[in-house]
Image (cartoon, helix red, strand yellow):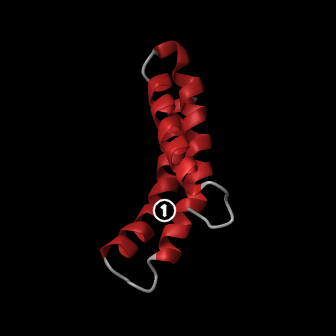
């Protein structure tokens, strides 16, 4: 979690709850479009935390560092995929 954000633990729990809400909205056909747009917003909102993870693990350069780097471009793929689903 970026250090400039307040209440990091609370934000982690909030983002996890938001993931559950987004997934719930994706299940029924009637709310699927709203769920897709909420998922896109969530993926954009958590991107700074994923970038921060890369910076936090830079000195270690272990498996978590490389996984965090691989995750960044995949997040754009997920946004594109959910956008196609939202149309």
Where does residue 77 sit, x and y in percent of width and height? Answer: 48, 52
Number of numbered callouts drawn: 1
Which quadrant is the C terminus positioned in? top right
Q: Secondary structure at mark 1?
A: helix
Q: Residue lying furthest top in this view? A: 30
Where does residue 6 sit, x and y in percent of width and height? Answer: 67, 57
Where does residue 3 sit, x and y in percent of width and height? Answer: 63, 67
Q: Residue at x 53, y 36 (%)?
A: 18
Where does residue 72 sit, x and y in percent of width and height? Answer: 49, 63
Q: Residues within 10 Å of mark 1 (few under 14, many from 20)?
A: few
Q: Residue at x 32, y 79 (%)?
A: 62
Whether residue 80 is visible, yes or no, is no
Between 71 and 50, the one nearer to me in the picture: 50
Residue that badge 1 annotates = 73
Q: Is residue 25 above or below residue 51?
A: above
Q: Residue lying furthest bottom in this view? A: 59
Q: Is 60 on the left or on the right of 41, as rendered?
A: left
Which quadrant is the N terminus positioned in? bottom right
Whether residue 58 is visible, yes or no, is yes
Q: Residue at x 51, y 31 (%)?
A: 22
Q: Is residue 3 above or below residue 78?
A: below
Q: Is residue 74 above or below residue 31?
A: below
Dividing the picture into quadrants, the one containing residue 38 is: top right
Between 84 and 59, the one nearer to me in the picture: 59
């Amino acid at each position: 979690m970026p250090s400039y954000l307040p209440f990091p633990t609370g934000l982690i729990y909030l983002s996890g709850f938001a993931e559950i809400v987004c997934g719930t909205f994706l299940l029924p056909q009637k709310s699927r479009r709203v769920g897709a747009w909420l998922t896109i917003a969530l993926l954009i909102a958590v991107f700074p935390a994923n970038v921060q993870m890369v910076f936090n693990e830079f000195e270690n350069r272990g498996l978590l560092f490389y996984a965090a780097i691989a995750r960044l471009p995949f997040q754009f793929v997920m946004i594109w995929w959910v956008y196609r689903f939202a149309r």
